[in-house]
Image: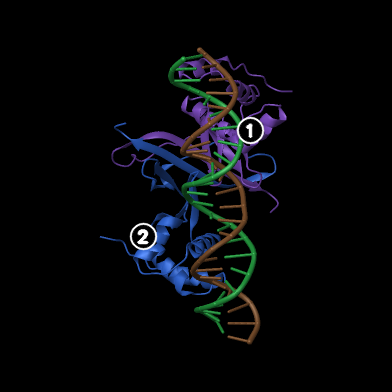
Chain colours: A blue, B purple, C green, D brown
Amino acid sequence: METVRPYSHVLKKMEAVGLRSTRQRLALAKVLFENGNRHITAEKLHAEARAAQIRVSLATIYNTLHQFTNAGLLREIVVDASRSYFDTNTSSHHHFYVEETGELKDIPETLVKHSELPPPPEGTMIDRVDVVVRVKGEKE
Amino acid sequence: METVRPYSHVLKKMEAVGLRSTRQRLALAKVLFENGNRHITAEKLHAEARAAQIRVSLATIYNTLHQFTNAGLLREIVVDASRSYFDTNTSSHHHFYVEETGELKDIPETLVKHSELPPPPEGTMIDRVDVVVRVKGEKE
DNA sequence: GTGTTTGCAAAGTGTTTGCAATTTA
DNA sequence: TAAATTGCAAACACTTTGCAAACAC
C-alpha cells in the first residue's frame, strides 16, 4: 500500500525557477515525488531510474538533485561522510539514522524541542537546526 | 593565551587499548590534546604536524584519528559530506557549523533540550543525538 | 626477535567538470 | 535556431589499502 502524492507542485516550481521540462527531469521527479516522503542517495536514484527503464546518466542525476535542492524541492541531509542523502520532505523535521543500514526515518519537528540555544557565533545567523538521532541494532 | 590541557589520560588510554607509544602517535596526541578542545580535519592535522616539524604521512594521520576515535579519545562529527571532522571533546555536546568557513563551535549540552523523542525504529536503540546548528553570515 | 606500525604509492569512492552532441522552447 | 541540457569520460578530493621497511617492546 503506497501513498501516492501528486507532484504538480514540482512542475510549477520547475517552471518558476526556469528549469526546462526534460524527459530526464520529469521522470526523476516522478520517481522522487510520487511515492511519499523519501530519503535517497544519488546512486540509489540512479538504480531506481534504470529499473524503471529511464535512461539517465549519473551526471544528470547529480545535476537534477542539486537543481531540485536549489529550487527548494529537495533538502540535502548530511549524516554520513561518505554519501549525500536527499529528502523529498523539505519541511522542518529531523531524523533517525540507522548506521548499519544507512536508513533514514523522519521525526516530526513537533517532537523535538531545542530550547535555549546560545547566540550563534559573531556575525552569523541561524540557518537551520539539524537533529540526527543515531540508532543502532539492539543486539550488538 | 592558550589553555594547556594535560594529556596523560591519552597515554593511559593508548596503553589500555594496546596502542604502542610511537613517535607519530605521541606527537599527534600532543597537537590534538594540548591545546584545549579542537575540531580538526585530517588535512589540517597533517598541516599542523608538518608545521610542528613532525614527519607523519597522511595515511598515519588517518590511522591515528580512527584509532583514537575507537579508543574513545576522539569523536567524529559529520557536518559536511566532503570531509570528516574529529572533536577532541568526547563529552556529550552539540555544534554550531559555519558553512562558509567550515568552522565548528561547541554548544554545551545543557543548552539544548530535546525532549519527547519518539521511540527509535523497531529493533534499534539510541546511540547518540547529534544537533548541528547551521549558521551563515548575516550579510548575504 | 616478533608483531606492530609506518610511509609510500596505488587504488577506491562518491562527486564534479569540460565539452560535443542532443533536445527544448 | 538559440540556449539549455545531457552523457560521457576524465578529473577531483578525500580516504583507504597493500606491502616492504622501520620500529616498539
Q: Chain of mark 2?
A: A
Q: Residue furthest right?
A: B1
The Cα atoms of the two marked residues, 1 and 2, are separated by 43 Å
| Residue A42 locus on image (x, y percent) | 45, 57
Q: Quadrant of the C terminus of chain B?
A: bottom right
Q: Residue D4: percent from the left, percent from the top?
A: 58, 73
Residue A36, numbered circle: 2
Please report, as a chain letter, where disc 1 is located. Answer: B
- The x and y percentages for residue B62 are 55, 34
From the viewer's perspective, is residue B54 above or below residue A89? above
Residue type at mark 2 is Gly
Q: Residues within 10 Å of mark 1 (few under 14, many from 20)?
A: many
User: Could you tell me which residue is drawn at 47 percent across and 42 percent down?
Assistant: A131
Residue drawn 45% across the image and 69% down it: A9
- Can residue A25 be seen in the rendering of this structure? yes
The image quadrant that residue B40 belongs to is: top right
| Residue B34 spot, x, y in % from top left | 64, 21
Using the rendered view, name the quadrant where residue C19 is placed: bottom right
Q: Which residue is mark 1?
A: B45
Mark 1 on the same chain as mark 2: no
Q: Secondary structure at mark 2?
A: loop
Left or right: B99 as drawn, with respect to A73? right
* Residue placed most toward the observer, A38 or A27: A27
Decide: is A3 above or below A82. Answer: below
